[in-house]
Image (spheres, grey):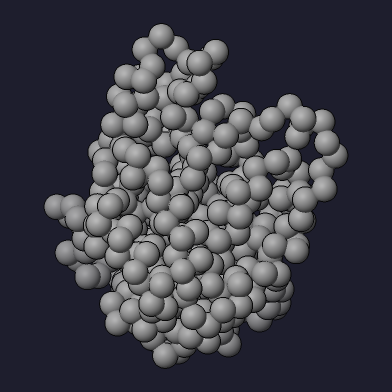
């Protein structure tokens, strides 16, 4: 008789059911794993053998064949250890075949028989729930599986406790839910930033409408501080967004506590990051920083220092909201709806325009430095601002600006207006509005339309730039509580495109 255990393989954040078939037959002793396993799956033989040996069980001297069906699908990861071990235990009559037939199993085995955590438990549990199965997963991942719904969950610490559960000598209790997977700690407050009132205003508009933001200024002017305070004024994720974001982190193995991610991710990769690290891919295709920041903020500090091809790879995902990785052996799509925030110096020395501090190559050094950024990439930033150095007299004054809580309340009210406006078209912010939806929502009054048309001609705005002006103006109107986009809102939105115009 062949033992069968159900598990999953991952294609991006999607799951594919895999049938683990275990057979023991007469013949020369052997242990073979077939079905296109990768190195980690092939090495499961030794981990499973040692785990069984630690419990006093020895594999019989037979020809053991493990088939992972479908056989033409590449199997990657150590989570196949547990289903292989369960199939062997069933074939050895340690547990019943019927015990494992109603479960989907995944987990990595230690040499001592312990079951250690693996990535992808949440999407696997969602697959089990759709198939009306229970799930067997590591103890450390049990709380994560709870978010998939009402299904039977067995989360043992070791193979021994799982066997005892099936034999009725021990009962595995249901895992306890962990409410929030986001680390708690002191949150940076917007009030800490002295001066920079215009930059704070731009940050508030970016948060209210979900707009991409580019800041340029000399070293020490507060660009990174402003970006770090953006998460503190953003609203929390709704239920759908929280589940989407948690699934991506689960597949990446970045969800150790097992709770839902309820606050918006803030990812800050170093400028030496490669293309697979930033947008996803690699030999074993994995989500990049852009997907890990899904529904949150991707902050790129020292923007021109990133490789040119890496930055240009962001252009398509910023428009589509997803990353498609095409390889000879895989074609995977990851969600990547992010709010891009970037900071840069105006030139390599950082002091372009300051006659006392600028280098001797100015202004040529600034032109060469900014030329590292392509025009199409810059065109995707809705808001582009200069962040000048803080004046000495402002540094000496105690911080007395608005707190993040006060600004967050205004952002929340503006977001509520947008959710009501776009509830029938399944978008949530002005930054995502397009086509007829945008034309209807952001139609300016006559004075505003005249100003926008004149500015489009003078600034030679692209169609994308024109629409981004409308989106930002709509957000400014929402913050002001205005139902109509007026000339003043258009004028302020145009002021946030001056960097591209100067270039």
Q: Residue furthest left?
A: 328
Q: Is residue 378 above or below residue 240?
A: above
Q: In the shown orientation, is residue 150 left or right of residue 316?
A: right
Q: Is residue 120 above or below residue 388?
A: below
Q: Where residue 328 sits: x, y (%)?
A: 14, 52
Q: Residue at x 81, y 43 (%)?
A: 399
Q: Considering the image in quadrants, where does the N terminus appear?
A: bottom left
Q: Residue at x 24, y 62 (%)?
A: 463
Q: Where residue 152 sits: x, y (%)?
A: 57, 84
Q: Where residue 417 sits: x, y (%)?
A: 56, 81
Q: In the shown orientation, is residue 372 left or right of residue 394?
A: left
Residue 222 in which image quadrant = top right
Q: In the shown orientation, is residue 495 left or right of residue 194?
A: left
Callout count: 0
Q: Where residue 225 sits: x, y (%)?
A: 64, 41
Q: Residue furthest top?
A: 360
Front-most of residues 477 and 258: 477
Q: Is residue 489 above or below residue 366?
A: below
Q: Residue at x 44, y 48 (%)?
A: 384
Q: Considering the image in quadrants, where does the C terminus appear?
A: top left
Residue 494 in which image quadrant = bottom left
Residue 149 in which image quadrant = bottom right
Q: In the shown orientation, is residue 406 left or right of residue 486?
A: right
Front-most of residues 277 and 461: 461
Looking at the image, can residue 108 be seen? Answer: no
Front-most of residues 347 and 282: 347
Front-most of residues 115 and 12: 12
Looking at the image, can residue 278 be seen? Answer: yes
Q: Residue at x 52, y 87 (%)?
A: 420
């Amino acid at each position: 008789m062949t033992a069968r255990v159900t598990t999953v393989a991952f294609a991006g954040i999607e799951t594919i059911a895999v049938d683990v078939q275990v057979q023991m037959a007469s013949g020369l002793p052997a242990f073979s794993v077939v079905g296109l396993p990768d190195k980690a799956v092939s090495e499961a033989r030794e981990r499973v053998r040692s785990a069984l040996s630690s419990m006093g069980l020895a594999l019989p001297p037979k020809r053991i064949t493990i088939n992972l069906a479908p056989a033409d699908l590449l199997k990657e990861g150590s989570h196949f250890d547990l289903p292989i071990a369960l199939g062997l235990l069933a074939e050895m009559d340690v547990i019943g075949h019927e015990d494992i037939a109603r479960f989907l199993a995944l987990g990595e085995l230690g040499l001592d028989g312990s079951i250690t955590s693996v990535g992808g438990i949440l999407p696997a549990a969602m697959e089990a729930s759709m198939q009306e199965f229970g799930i067997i997963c590591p103890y450390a991942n049990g709380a994560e599986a709870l978010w998939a719904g009402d299904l039977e969950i067995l989360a043992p610490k070791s193979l021994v406790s799982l066997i005892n559960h099936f034999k009725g000598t021990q009962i595995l209790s249901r895992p306890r839910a962990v409410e929030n997977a986001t680390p708690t700690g002191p949150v940076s407050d917007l009030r800490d930033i002295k001066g920079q009132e215009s930059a704070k205003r731009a940050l508030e508009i970016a948060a209210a409408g979900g707009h991409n933001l580019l800041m340029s200024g000399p070293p020490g002017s507060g660009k990174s501080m402003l970006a770090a305070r953006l998460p503190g004024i953003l609203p929390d994720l709704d239920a759908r967004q929280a589940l989407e974001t948690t699934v991506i982190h689960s597949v990446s193995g970045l969800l150790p506590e097992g709770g839902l991610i309820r606050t918006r991710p803030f990812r800050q990769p170093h400028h030496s990051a490669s293309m697979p690290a930033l947008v996803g891919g690699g030999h074993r295709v994995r989500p990049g920083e852009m997907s890990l920041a899904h529904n949150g903020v991707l902050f790129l500090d020292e923007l021109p220092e990133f490789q040119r091809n890496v930055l240009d790879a962001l252009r398509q995902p910023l428009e589509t909201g997803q990353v498609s990785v095409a390889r000879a052996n895989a074609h995977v799509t990851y969600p990547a709806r992010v709010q891009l925030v970037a900071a840069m110096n105006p030139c390599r020395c950082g002091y372009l325009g300051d006659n006392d501090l600028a280098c001797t190559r100015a202004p040529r050094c600034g032109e060469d430095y900014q030329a590292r950024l392509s025009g199409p990439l810059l065109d995707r930033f809705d808001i582009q601002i200069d962040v000048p150095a803080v004046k000495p007299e402002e540094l000496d004054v105690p911080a007395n600006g608005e707190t993040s809580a006060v600004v967050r309340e205004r952002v929340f009210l503006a977001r509520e207006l947008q959710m009501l406006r776009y509830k029938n078209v399944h978008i949530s912010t002005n930054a995502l509005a397009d086509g007829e939806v945008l034309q209807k929502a952001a139609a300016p009054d006559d004075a505003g339309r005249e100003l926008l048309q004149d500015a489009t001609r003078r600034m030679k705005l692209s169609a994308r730039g024109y629409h981004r002006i409308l989106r930002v103006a709509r957000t400014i109107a929402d913050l002001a509580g205005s139902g109509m986009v007026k000339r003043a809102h258009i004028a302020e939105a145009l002021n946030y495109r001056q960097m591209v115009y100067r270039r």
